[in-house]
Amino acid sequence: MRLPVNVVTNLAVIALVMISDSQHNALTTQHIHSPHEPFSSGPIALPFMRPEPGCRTFNSTAVENVISDMKSLLKDPDLARLFENTFPNTLDTTVKYYSKSENLAFIITGVYAQWLRDTATRFLAVYVPLLHSDPELASLVKAVINNEARYVTQYPYPPPESGIPPAFNGNEVGARVFPPYNASIVYDCKYEIDSLCAFLKLSRSYYNATKDASFINEAFQASFDENYNFISYYRYTGSGDSGVPFVNNNGTGEPKAYTGMVGTHHRPSDDLSVFAFLTPANAMLSVELTHLAQMLDEVSTMRNVSQQAKEWSTRITNAIWENTVVNNVFAYETNGFGSRYVMDDANVPSLLSLPYLGFLDRSHPTYVATRALLLSHANPYYAVGPTWKGIGGPHIDAWNPWHMAQISSIYGTDNGQDILDSLNLLLNNTSGLGLMHESLSIYNSSSYTRSWFAWANSYFAEMVLDLADRKPELILKENKSYRPGQ
Ligand SMILES: *[C@@H]1O[C@H](CO)[C@@H](O)[C@H](O)[C@H]1NC(C)=O
Ligand SMILES: *[C@@H]1O[C@H](CO)[C@@H](O)[C@H](O)[C@H]1NC(C)=O
Ligand SMILES: *[C@@H]1O[C@H](CO)[C@@H](O)[C@H](O)[C@H]1NC(C)=O
Ligand SMILES: *[C@@H]1O[C@H](CO)[C@@H](O)[C@H](O)[C@H]1NC(C)=O
Ligand SMILES: *[C@@H]1O[C@H](CO)[C@@H](O)[C@H](O)[C@H]1NC(C)=O
Ligand SMILES: *[C@@H]1O[C@H](CO)[C@@H](O)[C@H](O)[C@H]1NC(C)=O
Ligand SMILES: *[C@@H]1O[C@H](CO)[C@@H](O)[C@H](O)[C@H]1NC(C)=O
Ligand SMILES: *[C@@H]1O[C@H](CO)[C@@H](O)[C@H](O)[C@H]1NC(C)=O
Ligand SMILES: *[C@@H]1O[C@H](CO)[C@@H](O)[C@H](O)[C@H]1NC(C)=O
């Protein structure tokens, strides 16, 4: 079966990089497993969870200024504490290597690997508005873009310039991939659409914030030559390891028919797709291709890439509306033969996060109808317990909703009460540790996954800043919009 519009061979190389500095991880892990003083003065009394200044991995005055602004503006001292813990989390804990002169940065995640998506979204989420006022932070983001461009094309990991030795991903042993890759230098080689999209989003956001086009270097251009290589198919068999299950049909996935969308075997959570055409990932791709074209046209470069980006963006958006919507409700996945899976997965991109992704307005009737269904038992991954509820996914299971899905839900509404309900759930459900988790059981409020999940922390802080701008009356002392760096 052919994948229709296929955006890449080496895009497949989304992942990369284990870090072998167990010392840093041990320190961070130890720190986040127990609450630290002082506690916030609200009823939930959240601990202070930033590492000691001497252990922080990057310092930014602009970031400290936003924290002190928000602490004085926010009504609720518990929310202020959660913001204070989450907003700087990426800089505090994950900059493993940064060299301005080499223009390279190596950023680890809560699972000790640098994923294109996690890293890009974490940076753009919270720090982009500050780039014009903090040149060192801007250099760091530029270095992240350069490292990611290299990962898309030639994937040396970690950057050899860092002197950090590569590690070994035991899960992938026995997985067969076409086009083939070298497992000694590539950590993971799944093809996930949103990973490339996140790289595009970080690039255009950096450009938009700084108007500095110097990141469009050879590595960046080369990444597009790879990206726009059509391939007849991408095949990934999996290894049968519990985290890396076999993909049907010898690695080509379930049969699919041409729709105009891009097919994938894996969701943003790394779980297997049921049907190949993942609606939210295609929505993100369409949005990012449009922004990419705008940026390239503005700096008058790579006209051929820009032209293709525009054509594909239009084709994908049309295909989404023609193939995935029935009775005004989007399907999460389709196969081009008429089969649809109506559900949502907790990760981003999800259907719930379509407004956050910029695909449509939160008041669009199709979004409103889809959202109502997703936040009900018509969505098989929606679960409700006595103290916690929301949308989960097969990455954990159907009765462990994710904190990220509550955050997406806030982005998807203007209803003040709905926003406050979700915020309260998030504030009350950090297990007293003052940081976001990945998921939490609806049956047992002490049972959660991942104490250190930098992506979820950044997404939370980004959402609080969005509310401070969009709905100040809900969370700020004064009904006056706040925007960082202004
Ligand atoms: C950040 O600043 C603290 C002092 O406030 C210092 O000890 C630490 O080394 C700095 N971190 C980096 C990565 O420069
Ligand atoms: C894979 O990469 C390693 C490390 O650079 C190298 O020694 C080896 O020759 C490569 N293998 C192949 C098949 O290219
Ligand atoms: C560019 O930045 C402005 C101001 O922050 C923002 O409103 C706009 O959405 C951004 N556009 C893109 C394409 O990133
Ligand atoms: C765009 O054009 C340049 C210059 O002719 C070429 O090197 C590059 O491969 C082209 N890229 C794509 C994606 O067609
Ligand atoms: C499965 O794919 C592998 C390559 O990845 C190929 O060598 C093998 O022949 C395929 N098996 C079948 C039954 O098609
Ligand atoms: C959150 O906790 C506070 C304080 O313990 C409590 O007043 C509030 O009702 C809780 N919110 C929810 C949604 O359970
Ligand atoms: C989640 O919030 C509820 C309501 O405030 C509380 O009873 C429960 O203990 C919280 N769970 C965690 C893990 O914090
Ligand atoms: C709830 O989860 C905690 C942490 O995983 C575990 O220690 C405890 O035994 C669980 N309680 C029940 C009733 O299963
Ligand atoms: C806050 O300000 C907005 C816009 O100025 C206004 O529409 C809204 O009614 C105000 N809310 C309150 C609670 O005063």
Image: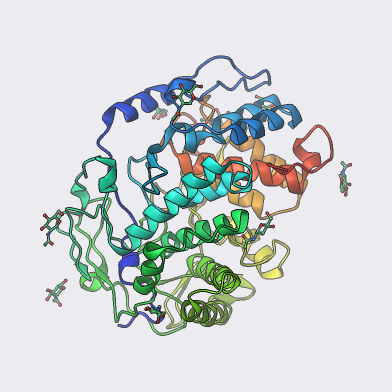
Residue 113 percent across, percent down from the top left: 33, 44
Closer to the camera in the image, 220 or 414? 220
**Ligand 9 sits in quadrant:** top right
Residue 465 percent across, percent down from the top left: 67, 42
Residue 108 percent across, percent down from the top left: 37, 41
Q: Is residue 215 left or right of residue 170?
A: right
On screen, residue 202 above or below 292: above
Viewer can see residue 383? no
Closer to the camera in the image, 57 or 440? 57
On screen, residue 476 above or below 376: above
On screen, residue 227 above or below 174: below
Residue drawn at point x = 33 percent, y = 54 percent: 15
Q: Is residue 351 left or right of residue 67?
A: left
Residue drawn at point x = 68 percent, y = 42 percent: 485
Question: Which residue is farthest top?
Answer: 37
**Where's the N terminus, which quadrant?**
bottom left
